[in-house]
Image: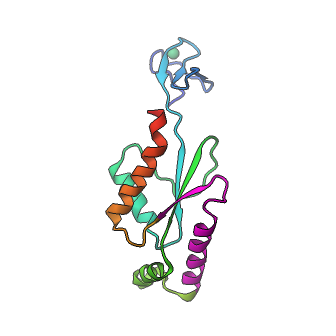
Amino acid sequence: MFNVCPKCGEYSDEKLISSDGGFAICQTCKHEHPFLRLPLLIITGASGTGKSTVALKLVAEQSAVICLDRDILWRGGIHYLALVCNEVELTRRLKARPAWRKSGTEAVLEGMTKFNQWLIDNATKSAPPMALLDTSELSLDESVDATKKWFSSLMAPSL
Ligand SMILES: [Zn+2]
């Protein structure tokens, strides 16, 4: 859809982007239409840190957010937010899940605890570095608010 000029209707998959980066220019009629080159914001974290719940709530609330369920390749700015929590709380949350999810098994608990700790230990050393959000003491709404603040801090320069 982006490849069809809204003014002249010509199709082209080649774009000229204005020097300020804010407009895509039609090759045929030179019409400029707004073009946002947005950063990719990724939320990661072990099961039980609130990642999926926070992402679902954000998608329901914010039209500017598109939720992708898996890692994808992306050229340009990538920013990571890792949701973490302390081991006691992580274990409590995983064990509290319905049995069919099998989240409370020793193997899952061990794997998620290790991943959670790896994120805590490596967030600042990874490339790119990850921001950390500790959800141990936060309600869902507080986690969502903190995630929104993180979004806003990254999106502000392009608005
Ligand atoms: Zn055109």
Magenta residue span: 107-133
In the image, residue 115 sits, relative to residue 129, either above or below, namely below
Query: Residue at (48%, 34%) from the top-left corner?
Result: 158
Query: Residue at (39%, 83%) from the top-left corner?
Result: 96
Residue 28 x %, y %: 57, 13
Q: Nearer the viewer, residue 29 or 104?
A: 104
The colour scheme applied to this rendered structure is: rainbow
* 147 left or right, relative to 129: left
Q: Nearer the viewer, residue 77 or 36?
A: 77
In the image, residue 56 sits, relative to residue 153, either above or below, namely below
Residue 152 x %, y %: 42, 45
Residue 64 x %, y %: 40, 43
* 120 left or right, relative to 51: right
Based on the picture, tell me whether residue 76 belongs to the magenta stretch.
no
Based on the picture, tell me whether residue 114 belongs to the magenta stretch.
yes
In the image, residue 50 sits, relative to residue 106, either above or below, namely above
Query: Residue at (42%, 79%) from the top-left corner?
Result: 93
* 62 left or right, relative to 156: left
Residue 13 x %, y %: 61, 27
